[in-house]
Image: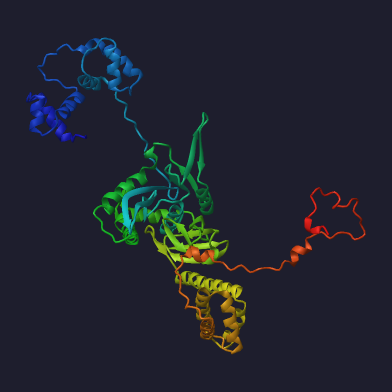
Amino acid sequence: MAIAPELRAQILRLYQAERWRIGTIASQLHLHRDTVQRVVAQACVMRPDAALRPSQIDAYLPFILETLAKFPTLTASRLHVMVRERGYSGGPDHFRHLVACHRPRPAAEAFLRLRTLPGEQAQVDWGHFGHIVVGQAKRPLMAFVMVLSYSRRIFLRFSLNARMDSFLRAHVLAFAAFGGVARVLLYDNLKSAVLERVDHASGTAIRFNADLLAFAAAHRYEPRPAAVARGNEKGRVERSIRYIRDNFFAARSFTDVDDLNAQALAWCEGDACDRRWPEDDRLTVRQAGQLEQPSLMKLPEHDYPVAERLEVHAGKTPYVRFDLNDYSIPHTHVRRTLTVLADPDRVRVLDGATVLATHSRSWDRRAQIEQEVHVQALVDHKRGARAHRATDRLTQAVPAVADLLQRAAQRGHNLGSITAELSKLLDRYGATPMQAAVAEALARDVPHPNAVRLALERARHADQMPPPVDTPLSERARSLDVTVQAHALDAYDALRPVADPTSVPATDPAADSTDPPDPKDEP
């Protein structure tokens, strides 16, 4: 708990000048007793006329001071165990307060004021600004911040992730806003910039992100990481993020990320540029930026591709999963590995260099983003496949149906309805009566299911058979009722070996037979 300087001074005044007890000070100032004791112990103050009383720790002070000199960060609890092993009998709480007065304080570190030339350096970092709910998804609200070290110009852009594509896209927008590129970009040790650090005796080896190196090479700047745990090296962007939290984001309302980015752009070009320039209070940041802009490197002639690229596998359904959502594709490309190219506004699905589908990007969760043409094409394909399967079943069971369907097509009849009606008749009457009925309908030159039905009914009345009754079957039972077309057995006869008529067997097979003779063969 941090104690305000005014409250600390009041505690010390009441303790030394007014000679109040610790408990009285705690009750009157509404503080905990340990808080008051800690303030007094850290100040190492005593009442002017208070007589020094001997303490149990006095005999162990040389050992304590020597140990703390060797191990300045040694905890008081561990030190208390070591002192107890040497005969100390005091409690740990009071011992902890006494050790705090004798613990060596680290010397305050001094820092040089870093100065850069115009256009020499820019500092980059991410800032986390909580979360935002989009539909059923809870996404992090990340802020990309780039600051020109000389003029202190700020570029700010919010996104719903901190992936490499968002990182590089924000770079491109920042360069466009500044009108150029700084020669050196200083990064924190984030994964988008530094993948690995290896400390050697001769120095530190750094493995940069390959995508960042390619981007830096295209824009001709040098990526440079800050040292680990040395936030002072990129203090300009650190202070800018704190400035953004206090002067832009606090108590700000927005509808979505696009609205927030529009407000951020207006703020960067307005209030953030109109503030006083730290190097010279006679100038503003805007004026300093105008002086720095000619020193920036020019932008490349061609735009750098910054879309997110991801290999995805399409399953048995015509969708690909990307960033918590499903996007439709043509049904002809299922069971394949495809490529997704995504930016904040759209998602494209490619098969090689061919664009299969283009969708508006959704930041929701478990959403299905479809194109009506993809769904309708699959429905039409399934309907055609079902009709084709029904036709195959009819022609295999009743060969005469093929001629009937051909004549019906020539007269412009609906083959789908004819196939459905004939399938019902086949299920009800069977294949043999159906073949005769179709032949009779064709003989009458009436290629229609009604003629087949009348022929079946006449045959039933002639045979004095009861009317057929439909038996409801499950899908599994229907799938087992498969019509198998018999094949000719001549092919098997061709496989039988043919004996050579010129060859004579060495022995008579009948003579070698040990079976008894058949009584029917005797005269």
Instruction: Between residue 121 and residue 189, name the one nearer to us.
Output: 189
- Say which quarter of the image contains residue 85: top left
In the shown orientation, is residue 336 left or right of residue 79? right
Query: Residue drawn at (26%, 49%), measured in percent from left and top?
Result: 246
In the shown orientation, is residue 299 left or right of residue 47? right
Query: Which quadrant holds the N terminus?
Result: top left
Q: Residue furthest front?
A: 523
Would you place residue 5 above or below residue 272 in this image?
Answer: above
Instruction: Between residue 415 and residue 323, name the one nearer to us.
Output: 415
Counting every numbered tag in the picture gives 0
Would you place residue 514 above or below residue 32 in this image?
Answer: below
In the rendered image, residue 110, in percent from the top left (x then y), is placed at 34, 32
Query: Residue drawn at (43%, 67%), measured in percent from left and top?
Result: 370
Query: Which quadrant holds the C terminus?
Result: bottom right
* Residue 149 visible at all: no
- Say which quarter of the image contains residue 430: bottom right
Query: Residue drawn at (36%, 42%), measured in percent from left and top?
Result: 235
In the rendered image, residue 132, in percent from the top left (x then y), is placed at 31, 54
In the shown orientation, is residue 141 left or right of residue 483? left
